[in-house]
Image: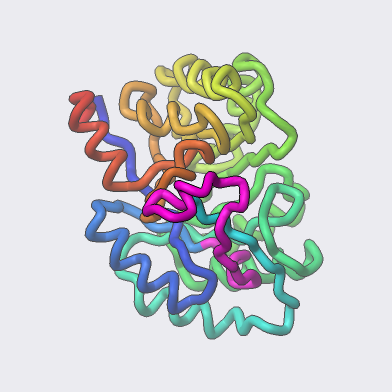
């Protein structure tokens, strides 16, 4: 079975923080890194989870929650940030600027976000992430800017839950002409919903569609862990570690590849 590309979504909320994490990602075996440009307009505060027990709070297992604060548009110099990211990172880049409607943090209007995507495309990344619901005429205009060296990831991010497996499969098939890779991510509230994503990936494994299917929530990491078996093209990971990743459906890049080795996938 083929080994999927391992893409690390860079941690950090400044260009400098992202470039530092790219070094960690490379040592973790990443093939590709994703720069989430919308995160440039955020800051985070780590606070102790007050629901933790006294024993947890006093020990090494104390749980830390992350609170995200949204920044104003004028705080970020996007051109400068793009320059830093492109010049400092030597791995293939996915550039993404996620809208709030699909769970992102970009604070401006849709017109401003499209301009941010234009600027990202002009930097010549290996892939540009364009949501499947971008207005067709606007999307076509963005596609015209991509050269032969920039592929397109057509992404679907549902924050309204996980549909049945058959609907996920149909959604992927309906959008297959929108990009070189079809990425779909669904919020899961339980492991049954995580299994729906796994089933959809299984149904698509013999298709000619390059997929990256995953969940955010319980069971959301199953499609990532078993991506080689499911014939997925790319798997999104992180350099973060901790108790929270499994509940969020995410997985550390090094842990993922250790799991693949254990399962004899790669």
The x and y percentages for residue 98 are 64, 56
Asked whether residue 150 is in view, the answer is: no
Residue 46 within the segment the image draws in magenta: yes
Q: Residue at x 61, y 52 (%)?
A: 50
- Left or right of 205? Residue 1 is left
226 shown above or below 132: above
Q: Residue at x 74, y 55 (%)?
A: 100
203 shown above or below 15: above
Asked whether residue 194 is in view, the answer is: yes
- Left or right of 67? Residue 61 is left
- Left or right of 229? Residue 265 is left
The x and y percentages for residue 33 are 39, 58
Residue 179 within the segment the image draws in magenta: no
115 shown above or below 171: below
- Left or right of 182? Residue 262 is left
Quarter of the image holding residue 227?
top left
Q: Nearer the viewer, residue 62 or 141?
A: 62
Q: Nearer the viewer, residue 126 or 75?
A: 75
Residue range corresponding to the magenta coloring: 36-62
Q: Residue at x 40, y 40 (%)?
A: 235
The x and y percentages for residue 263 are 22, 24
């Amino acid at each position: 079975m083929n080994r999927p590309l391992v893409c690390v979504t860079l941690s950090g909320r400044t260009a400098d923080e992202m470039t530092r994490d790219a070094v960690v990602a490379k040592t973790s075996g990443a093939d590709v890194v994703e720069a989430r440009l919308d995160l440039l307009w955020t800051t985070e505060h780590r606070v102790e989870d007050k629901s933790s027990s006294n024993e947890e709070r006093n020990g090494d297992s104390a749980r830390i929650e992350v609170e995200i604060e949204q920044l104003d548009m004028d705080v970020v110099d996007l051109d400068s940030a793009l320059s830093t990211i492109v010049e400092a990172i030597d791995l293939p880049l996915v550039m993404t600027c996620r809208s709030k409607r699909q769970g992102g943090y970009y604070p401006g209007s849709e017109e401003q976000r499209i301009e941010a995507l234009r600027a990202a495309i002009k930097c010549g990344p290996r892939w540009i992430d364009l949501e499947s619901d971008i207005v067709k005429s606007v999307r076509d205009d963005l596609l015209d800017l991509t050269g032969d060296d920039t592929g397109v990831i057509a992404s679907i991010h549902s924050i309204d839950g996980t549909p049945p497996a058959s609907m996920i499969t149909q959604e992927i098939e309906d959008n297959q002409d929108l990009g070189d890779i079809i990425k779909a991510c669904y919020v899961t509230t339980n492991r049954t919903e995580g299994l729906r994503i796994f089933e959809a990936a299984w149904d698509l494994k013999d298709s000619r569609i390059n997929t990256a299917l995953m969940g955010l929530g319980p069971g959301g990491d199953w499609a990532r862990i078993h991506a080689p078996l499911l014939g997925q093209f790319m798997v999104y990971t992180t350099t973060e570690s901790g108790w929270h990743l499994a509940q969020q459906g995410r997985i550390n890049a090094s842990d993922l590849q250790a799991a693949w080795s254990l399962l004899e996938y790669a």
